[in-house]
Image (cartoon, rainbow, N blue to C red):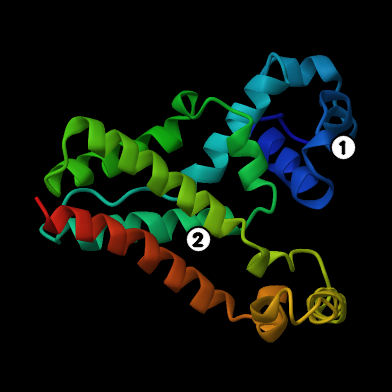
Amino acid sequence: MGKLTARAIVERALEIGDAEGLDAVTIRRLAADLDVTPMALYWHFKNKDRLLVGMADHLVAGFAPAPADDRSWERRLRDLVEGLIRVLRGHPCARQVLEQVDQSEVPGFLAVWDQALGLCRAAGFSVEESCMISKYLLQSAVAIADAPMHFDAGRTPAEIDEIVRRKRLGLESLSADAYPNLVAMAGPMAGSMDPALYDSFGVDLVLSGIEALAARR
């Protein structure tokens, strides 16, 4: 291969993490896959912790927050959340990566976080409130992107149907007397729900709460 770059390393690390989980991402494994010595990787990332930070930054770097414009803070905050969800959705290991790093060390995440804080302040929230809201908001975006609605990465349609079927049957087999609502709603609870609807409803749910709080100011 050509000259080894940090980008090539993190892209391969994300491929492994998406397919096999983060435990499979090791310096030795990456070196073998990239046909280099482990020392060549250490030149870019001195340990796995720094590699994880690089992976996190590469994840979020795919989404650049739009610069300030004349749109309402509500519209800009929605675009910020939806954009982050779209980027994270492409990598099944995204949530694991972001949970294992100090997000304050990830430049791409800092840019998103900074804009979220500014929009909260524009909505009239105090500094303390803005800090709390931004944390809840960004963690909600990560959770929505990692939702069971999107467990189909790397699986065939037949495999997905079988997973949903087993989950649905498991819920339907529960006692209707003890769990009447779970039994009645077994289909959507098992995952056979429109992912686009799941996402839009989730974003609406989170943002409507913020907008309602802002309206009290």
Looking at the image, is mark 1 or mark 2 earlier in the sequence? Answer: 1
In the displayed structure, 139 sits above or below 76; it is above
Q: Is residue 53 left or right of residue 156?
A: left
Does the image show residue 69? no
Q: Which mark is residue 86?
A: 2
In the displayed structure, 107 sits above or below 191; it is above
> Which quadrant would residue 83 be assigned to in this image?
bottom left
Q: Is residue 115 left or right of residue 54?
A: left
Amino acid on which the number 1 mark rests in the picture: Asp
Q: Which residue is mark 1?
A: 33
Amino acid on which the number 2 mark rests in the picture: Arg
Q: At x 62% / y 45%, what residue is drawn? A: 95
Q: At x 59% / y 28%, what residue is drawn? A: 101
Residue 207's spot in the image, x, y percent? 32, 60
Residue 81's spot in the image, x, y percent? 39, 56
The one nearer the camera, 131 or 217, is 217
> Which quadrant would residue 161 be assigned to in this image?
bottom right
